[in-house]
Amino acid sequence: MTTMKNFILDCERMKYADTGIYHYCLNLGRHIQELVDQRVEKLTFYAPESAQAVLGEDSAFITQRSSHKFFMPMLGKYDLWHATYQNTSYIPILNSRIKVLLTIHDLNFIHDEKKTAAKKKKHLEHLQANIDRSDAIVCISDFCKKDVLKYCQVGNRPVYIIHNGTNTLNEPSLSSSSYRPSNRFLFSIGVVTMKKNFHTLLPLLQHDHDMELLIAGRDDDTEYLNYLMESARELGVEKNLRILGTISESEKAWYFENCYAFTSPSLAEGFCMPVAEAMSVGKPLFLSNKTALPEIGGNVAFYFSDFKPSQMQKTFLNGMSLYKETNMQDAIKKRSADFCWEKAAKEYLDVYRSLFD
């Protein structure tokens, strides 16, 4: 008789809405739930109450509590804990019977010039402790895996690469309070911090006064936001820059569908889900050539090799011209299909099961 295997998917980070890891947990969780062999496998979500309805009211849950940082709930009947956030403090350290799979999204802190050596060391020590407790590791890109192998000690643990899927965009719509641009616009989305490098896009607006730049995302760095706005004023393009803040899924879909091009000049990405979302509607992609972005954009994106205004302008104009002349939309959409949540869920389930072979 086959013994039932009980898996826990850690969705603790879903307490932070409008973040990449929120959608990672939501989409991966939904697809694993559909794929488990219910005769011999069961999936339970470790999630805050606020996220349980969206994960499915008929699903099994362990409700996340802040006290679990110090005293984990009883996990005696469970076989696998999938820690979906590499810096988690919610992990069964003492229960050695339960297997642990750790997903690592990035080591962006290593590439953050603003972080001191002491802070980087602290982050790395916490990550290493989680690696030491894990039985296997998943990295969401080859770039991420290379960083992990360079900066961490993984021992003989298997390290897998499983790319994220493309989030299915909602029906595009704007509300009466949404910003509706009257001109063609570049769209970018991400937490507004220095590493996202949004300010380097501003000179593109100087050469085209009929084009706007829309940036969506949570403000995590007021100092950088002020710098961004001040830079726009100095360049005389403040009227062409719109900081949207957090937006709804329907608004996001509308901006993706209607933008002139999608831009991400980011300096540090473990994957960058918005790139795959922009691909799904065939939009021209202008990305930095840093970290994981070339791996995700492949040969259907255009890359900023440096951030000098003249070089970025040249890349942008040549890219838009090539996009139009060669009808790249279909090729971009085709690459989007490589990033599939069902495929990712199948690969994660294969890793789950391998830990009990």
Image (cartoon, grey):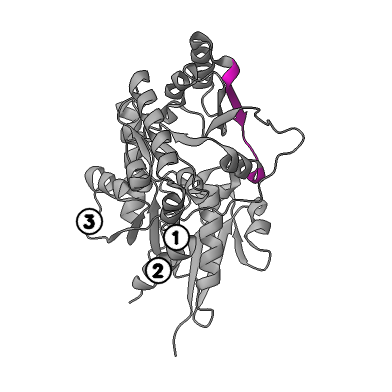
Camera-near label (2 vs 3) is 2
Q: Which mark is residue 155?
A: 3
C-beta proximity under 8 Å, tags 3 and 1: no
Decide which of tag 3 and tag 1 comes sooner along the chain.
1
Q: Could you say which is closer to the camera, residue 107 or residue 49?
A: 107
C-beta proximity under 8 Å, tags 2 and 3: no
Which three-letter amino acid code belongs to the residue tagged 3?
Gly
Q: Which mark is residue 82?
A: 1
**310 lies left or right of 252:** left
How far apart, in angstroms, are the residues tagged by discs 2 and 3?
19 Å
Q: Could you say which is closer to the camera, residue 343 or residue 355?
A: 343
Residue farthest toward the right in the current orientation of the protein: 176
How far apart, in angstroms, are the residues tagged by discs 3 and 1?
19 Å
Alpha-carbon neighbours of circle 2 within 10 Å: few (<14), some, or many (≥20)?
Answer: many
Q: Could you say which is closer to the camera, residue 102 or residue 143?
A: 143
Query: Does 158 appear above or below 357?
Result: above
Residue under pointer 2: 352
Which three-letter amino acid code belongs to the residue tagged 2?
Tyr
Secondary structure of the residue carrying tag 1 is: strand
Residue 245 colored in magenta in the image: yes
Q: Where in the figure is residue 117, as x and y percent of width and height? A: 30, 27
Alpha-carbon neighbours of circle 3 within 10 Å: few (<14), some, or many (≥20)?
Answer: few
Decide which of tag 2 and tag 3 comes sooner along the chain.
3
For the C terminus, the image quarter is: bottom left
C-beta proximity under 8 Å, tags 1 and 2: yes
Per the rendered image, the range of residues in magenta is 239-250
Which three-letter amino acid code belongs to the residue tagged 1?
His
Q: Where in the figure is residue 165, as x and y percent of width and height? A: 47, 56
Secondary structure of the residue carrying tag 3 is: loop
Query: Does 71 appear above or below 255?
Result: below
